[in-house]
């Protein structure tokens, strides 16, 4: 507001915002009674509000400090109208954070001006044909609709405000029509809807951002009264919209069914008993009953049937009989072939629809009525998700437990849930998936790639229910059963005479599957049944840390504990499990030899985090041959310990002969960005994962993680021990270490490595020193002979969020970007080119950088005389994006 710009800010209470303005102006921070003070106020007013004639702002301020209340209010109104029509009012005050943002603020200010209603009605009507007046009316109308301020809305509509204007809605966070907002769940204002209808609002209009009609919103979010208001206003009750719902299109009826969507699939029997005892209906039931009176059972049967199928899917048992009485058929299919029973089985979550399934069956639903193309039945769908409760209900009602499904296309496959999604699935899993035909095969298929900590893992209870009901076994079912940590399921299958050593379609045995899925609790049962250890390696068990299971396998002939797989040794697997006792037991009892991967796994899995683990590390190193020269794995262990300041581990590892490259958890562009920007916390998080076997991880000198972890003393010890620095090491040191460290590192680097970049998209050492304002280091590098005109890097480094990217810059371009005049002078003295070419990817010239960063005063200085625009002037259009 004007008073804020004049340093006469009013009190922050919303109710008195504008009425206090006059008091603030009468007693401002400077006197308005003197000519100088008055002129100062007028000058500030002129900066923020143009005049239509000379002296207009002076007259405004005179009116505000005059004794005429009406004239003062008129001036306040004009100030407010100007700011609102030019979108100068923002929601910066803490008072409005939890309310309707700036819209509440706008309405509060308007009311606090205190003009009589007749006056502002007259002002609206007189100014509506003027551009500023029209903009003011539209902005105030948007605020009034968002805050449901009906009296202001009505006056503005009478003055010509458009009831169909697309507005930015605070509650919905998108562009919508006023009728859509009135029916939103966070608003639900029937009186606002009535007002808009009275002024001719298009009740079924939508926007690109909000495609749901007001009627659809009302059916799902509001009361039957609201729905009736819209219907009587002519809203189209025959409208159908297709969305991402697999079963049915959207209509008024299906939206009424969805009215309880926030509670769907989480209600339990206690919830429903409490609701029944209260005598209240669930949301949407009254709306559905009202709407059903508007449809003809014959002409509108498809709409009613869609609602019936949707009700079955959404577990709306309270609506089922109303829809049946309105003409819905229990076993009728949708155009896509879905029945109500299939819909209920598909939407069930951990048995949530079991009572709906039972109700449909009791009403006469055919339990084995299948999808026309694939022959999928409700039982196939229920067991595919592992829904034990629904499976038992279907089996109890006579479902064919050996029904054959085939030719499962993409549309029907969606009914089977996430376990049967093909994207990202291994070839072996895809083979098993496509071979599923019987309910038991669907029940036993588990796609672990589609499970995460955010989803519920598929369980084996549905498969167990089928087997106990007599489902026929297929070849490989024992192996498939071992995908689940369910000992009862495994025993039930074995009790039916299944061969414990038969493999699945991919040749995987039961014991192999058990170890692959980490279900080590099943190992004893399999071994007792005679499972062969052929093809089984103990790595999975080692990684689980289960010493008891390892002993059991060894006892049954799995003595190949010294063997390695393609990934790692069994000792490394044990070390990765953080079970130090198991690691030592393997070495001392079964004489497993030392390997470097085990040391790397032990250190990188945290053996050095506790000093009490010293004896375990001592046993591991005691097995290491004295004449061994360690390679990359041991260098990685040393780098990890140095980064984490594990002094006692470093001391022991420095006694070893190590000559290898250190692997660090840096792989993506985002990883390189954080490394170059000197963010060790990011690397510490990356170190928590098992990274050392990933061939795409970066390799470098062991000094890199040491210096990145800000431990120069340890870095000096490593240098004294003979470890050599590399280019990346120097780049890390430039970011944080003193010039003395740079001197020590450069003395150990070749001339080329002192000045060249570690990667094509990283800075040269000199460019980095300039970028990070390390003047002494930059001067030292120039003294050594660094090229001040080395080209910018080949591309920018950026993560997915584009947070703090590193743009390609020459040394001088970086200095200008930092507005570092001292550095600019230093570079110019050694001949830096002021017109160096920009980097190939997102680069910029010095002039573009200065313009984009607001440092044009620098390029106008005599020192930068001769700086020019690029030959291709179109490049100047991109100066903002290239300058961050």
Image (spheres, rainbow, N blue to C red):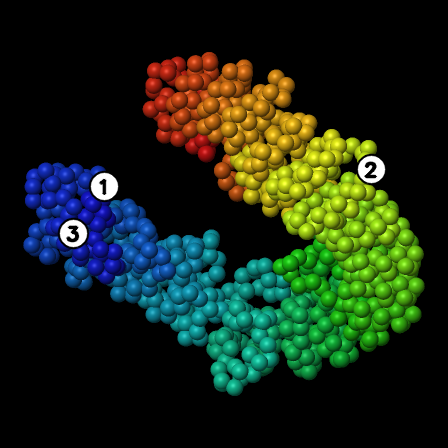
Dot 3 or dot 2: first in sequence order is 3
On the question of residue 126 being in view, the answer is: no
Q: Residues within 10 Å of mark 3 (few under 14, many from 20)?
A: many
What residue is disc 3 on? 24
What residue is disc 2 on? 625
Q: Position of residue 853 (x, y in %)?
A: 39, 30
On the question of residue 525 being in view, the answer is: yes
**Circle nearer the viewer, 2 or 1:** 2
Q: Position of residue 614 (x, y in %)?
A: 71, 48
Residue at the (46%, 14%) spot, across then down: 830
The residue lying toward the viewer, choosing from 493 and 247, is 493
SS for dot 3: helix
Residue at the (33%, 24%) spot, across then down: 857
Q: Could you tell me how many numbered marks the image carries?
A: 3
Q: Is residue 658 above or below residue 398?
A: above
Q: Position of residue 797 (x, y in %)?
A: 55, 34
**Circle nearer the viewer, 1 or 3:** 3
Dot 1 or dot 3: first in sequence order is 3
SS for dot 1: helix
Q: Position of residue 351 (x, y in %)?
A: 67, 73
**Circle nearer the viewer, 3 or 2:** 2
| Gap between marks 1 and 3 measured at Cα | 18 Å
Residue at the (64%, 58%) spot, across then down: 453
Dot 2 or dot 1: first in sequence order is 1
731 lies left or right of 519: left
| Gap between marks 2 and 1 measured at Cα | 81 Å
Determine which quarter of the picture holds residue 391.
Answer: bottom right
What residue is disc 1 on? 48
Circles 2 and 1 in contact, beta carbons < 8 Å: no
Q: Residues within 10 Å of mark 1 (few under 14, many from 20)?
A: some
| Gap between marks 3 and 2 measured at Cα | 85 Å
């Amino acid at each position: 507001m004007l008073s804020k710009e004049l340093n006469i800010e009013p009190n922050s209470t919303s109710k008195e915002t504008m009425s206090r303005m006059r008091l603030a102006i009468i007693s401002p921070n400077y006197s308005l009674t003197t000519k100088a003070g008055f002129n100062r106020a007028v000058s500030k007013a002129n900066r923020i509000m143009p005049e239509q004639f000379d002296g207009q702002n002076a007259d405004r301020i005179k009116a505000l400090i005059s004794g005429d209340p009406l004239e003062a209010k008129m001036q306040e109104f004009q100030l407010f109208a100007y700011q609102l029509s030019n979108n100068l009012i923002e929601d910066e005050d803490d008072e409005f954070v939890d309310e309707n943002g700036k819209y509440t603020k706008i309405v509060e200010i308007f009311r606090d001006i205190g003009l009589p209603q007749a006056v502002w009605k007259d002002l609206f009507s007189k100014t509506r044909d003027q551009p500023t007046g029209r903009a003011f009316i539209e902005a105030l109308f948007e605020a009034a609709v968002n805050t449901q301020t009906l009296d202001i809305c009505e006056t503005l509509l009478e003055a010509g405000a458009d009831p169909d204007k697309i507005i930015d809605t605070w509650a919905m966070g998108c562009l919508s029509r006023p009728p859509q907002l009135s029916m939103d769940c966070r608003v639900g204002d029937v009186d606002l809807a009535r007002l808009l209808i009275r002024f001719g609002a298009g009740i079924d209009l939508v926007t690109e951002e909000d495609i749901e009609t007001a009627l659809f919103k009302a059916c799902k979010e509001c009361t039957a009264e609201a729905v009736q208001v819209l219907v009587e206003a002519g809203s189209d009750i025959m409208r159908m919209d297709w969305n991402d719902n697999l079963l049915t299109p959207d209509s008024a009826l299906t939206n009424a069914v969805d009215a309880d969507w926030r509670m769907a699939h989480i209600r339990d029997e206690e919830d429903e008993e409490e609701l029944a005892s209260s005598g209240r209906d669930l949301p949407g039931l009254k709306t559905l009953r009202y709407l059903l009176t508007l449809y003809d059972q014959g002409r509108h049967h498809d709409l009613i049937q869609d609602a019936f199928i949707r009700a079955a899917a959404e577990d709306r048992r309270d609506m089922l009989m109303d829809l049946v009485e309105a003409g819905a058929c229990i076993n009728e299919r949708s155009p896509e072939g879905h029945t109500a029973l299939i819909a209920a089985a598909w939407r069930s979550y951990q048995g949530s629809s079991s009572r709906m399934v039972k109700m449909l069956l009791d009403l006469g639903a055919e339990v084995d009525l299948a999808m026309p193309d694939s022959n999928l039945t409700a039982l196939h769908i229920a067991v595919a998700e592992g829904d034990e409760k629904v499976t038992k209900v279907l089996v109890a009602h006579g479902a064919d437990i050996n029904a054959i499904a085939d030719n499962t296309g993409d549309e029907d496959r969606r009914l089977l849930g996430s376990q049967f999604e093909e994207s990202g699935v291994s070839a072996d899993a895809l083979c098993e998936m496509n071979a599923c035909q019987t309910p038991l095969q669907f029940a036993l298929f588990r796609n672990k790639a589609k499970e995460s900590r955010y989803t519920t893992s598929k369980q084996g209870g549905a498969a167990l229910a089928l087997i106990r009901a007599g489902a026929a076994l297929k070849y490989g079912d024992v192996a498939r059963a071992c995908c689940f940590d369910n000992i009862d399921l495994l025993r039930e299958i074995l009790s039916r005479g299944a061969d414990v050593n038969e493999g699945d379609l991919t040749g995987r045995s039961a014991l192999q599957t058990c170890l692959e899925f980490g279900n080590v609790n099943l190992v004893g049962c399999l071994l007792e049944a005679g499972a062969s250890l052929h093809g089984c390696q103990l790595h999975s068990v080692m990684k689980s840390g289960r010493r008891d299971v390892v002993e059991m396998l060894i006892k049954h002939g799995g003595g190949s504990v010294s063997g390695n797989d393609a990934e790692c040794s069994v000792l490394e697997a044990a070390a990765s499990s953080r079970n130090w006792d198991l690691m030592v037991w393997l070495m001392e009892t079964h004489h497993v030899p030392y390997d470097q991967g085990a040391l790397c796994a032990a250190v990188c899995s945290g053996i050095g985090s506790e000093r009490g683990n010293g004896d375990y590390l001592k046993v591991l190193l005691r097995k290491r041959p004295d004449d061994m020269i360690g390679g990359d794995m041991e260098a990685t262990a040393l780098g990890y310990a140095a980064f984490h300041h594990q002094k006692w581990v470093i001391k022991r590892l420095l006694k070893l002969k190590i000559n290898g490259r250190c692997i660090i958890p840096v792989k993506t562009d985002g990883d390189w960005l954080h490394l170059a920007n000197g963010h060790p916390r990011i690397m510490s998080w990356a170190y928590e994962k098992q990274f050392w076997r990933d061939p795409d991880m970066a390799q470098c000198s062991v000094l890199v993680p040491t210096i990145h972890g800000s431990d120069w003393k340890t870095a000096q010890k490593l240098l004294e021990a003979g470890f050599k620095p590399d280019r990346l090491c120097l780049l890390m040191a430039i970011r944080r270490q003193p010039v003395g460290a740079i001197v020590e590192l450069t003395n150990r680097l070749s001339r080329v490595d002192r000045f060249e970049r570690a990667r094509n998209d990283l800075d040269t050492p000199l460019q980095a020193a300039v970028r990070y304002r390390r003047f002494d280091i930059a001067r030292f590098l120039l003294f050594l002979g660094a090229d001040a005109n080395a080209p910018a890097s080949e591309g920018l480094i950026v993560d997915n969020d584009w947070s703090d990217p590193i743009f390609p810059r020459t040394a001088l371009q970086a200095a200008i970007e930092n507005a570092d005049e001292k550095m600019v002078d230093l570079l110019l003295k050694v001949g830096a080119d002021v017109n160096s070419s920009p980097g190939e990817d997102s680069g910029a010239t010095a002039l573009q950088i200065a313009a984009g960063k607001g440092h044009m005063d620098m390029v106008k200085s005599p020192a930068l005389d001769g700086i020019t625009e690029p030959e291709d002037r179109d490049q100047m259009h991109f100066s903002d994006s290239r300058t961050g």
